[in-house]
Image (cartoon, helix red, strand yellow):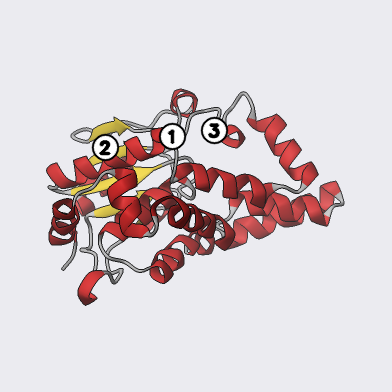
Amino acid sequence: MRRLKKIKSFRDLGGIECANGKKVVFGRLLRSGHHGSLKAGQALWLKLLYNVNEIIDLRANEEVTDNPDKMITGVKYIHIPLLTDEQNPVVNRRTRGHMLRKVIEEGGAITHLCEVYRTLVSSELSLHGLHEIFTILLTDHEGAFLWHCTQGKDRTGICTAAILMSLGCDEKSIIEDYMRYNKLFRVKNFLIYLAIMIFKFSKKKAQTAVQLITAQREYILAAYDEIKKLYGDELGFLKKGIGLSDSDIVKMQEIYLE
């Protein structure tokens, strides 16, 4: 398992408690950051340990062009962007330098990312993408599925939240899973904070930079707030927003819970 830990933000959703006390099946639903630096040995472990059949890339077009996934023999790659390059300028190569400076200078990381999370549960592109992902999970449900964005936090977090909602996972457990991201990068994030404090002489800039690269409860709560405003509740989001039927939700639970 040590090899898989080297894949950015990699983790298995197996064991999370969902509907009727049942838990997510281990080795079927996987999430991570991008695979641009995936090594051959790591790819082999993904196949041997998890039998990964499909990898879903949630990144925007320019992100994929700049840092494409490493192809794994026998794995189907599917590109389903949840945001456009313009909707997520902080990770876009052309705009990220300017946007990072702007956000850090103005201290607006939380405001910026709350808006991104609201977009992820309301925009036509994101809702269409989530519908495509569920179609794949419902029809090609052999082996394991792995979805990812760049860091494995924002778009991956919302995709994961939607899947867990369909499995009957409650809001508290979904938020707990989302916040687990920070445990993976605790030391790295502290070093980034320390470096900015030392070289920029600014606590505000250091805090803002860390807010951009960490999971914050405000972000996922902004998504929930938008869901409740637009669709009433999580079930409304799944049915009215993403377009799932009652039978789709029942089938998701039959396939991915035990």
- Relative placement, left or right, of 96 versus 163 is right
* Residue located at (78% from left, 44% from top): 106
Q: Secondary structure at mark 3?
A: loop
Q: Is residue 196 left or right of residue 16?
A: right
In front here: 113 or 185? Answer: 113
Count up the numbered dots: 3
Residue 35 lies, in percent from the top left, at 40, 38
Compare residues 253 and 245 and report the one nearer the observer.
245
Q: Which residue is labeled 1 in the image? A: 59
152 and 162: which one is in front? 162
Amino acid under disc 2: Glu
Q: Position of residue 203 (x, y in %)?
A: 81, 57
Give the structural element (helix, strand or loop) at label 1: loop
The amino acid type found where label 3 is placed reads Gln
Question: In this rendering, is residue 237 above or below 89?
Answer: below
- Could you say where residue 126 lies in the image, as x and y percent from the top left? 40, 38
> Would you call the spot at circle 1 few (<14 residues within 10 Å), some (14-19), or many (20 or more)?
many
Residue 215 visible, this angle: yes
Q: Circle 2 is placed at which residue position?
A: 132
In the rendered structure, which disc, 1 or 3, sits on the residue that comes first in sequence?
1
Tell me the residue that label 3 is attached to: 87
CA gap between label 2 and label 3 equals: 20 Å
Helix, strand, or loop for circle 2?
Answer: helix
| Residue 257, percent from left and from top | 18, 64
Q: Residue at x 57, y 29 (%)?
A: 92
Q: Earlier in the sequence, mark 1 or mark 2?
A: 1
User: Hey, what amino acid is under mark 1?
Assistant: Arg
Nearer to us of marks 1 and 3 is 3
Q: Nearer the viewer, mark 1 or mark 2?
A: 2
Sooner in the amino-acid sequence: mark 2 or mark 3: 3
Quadrant of the image containing the C terminus: bottom left
Marks 1 and 3, how far apart in space?
11 Å
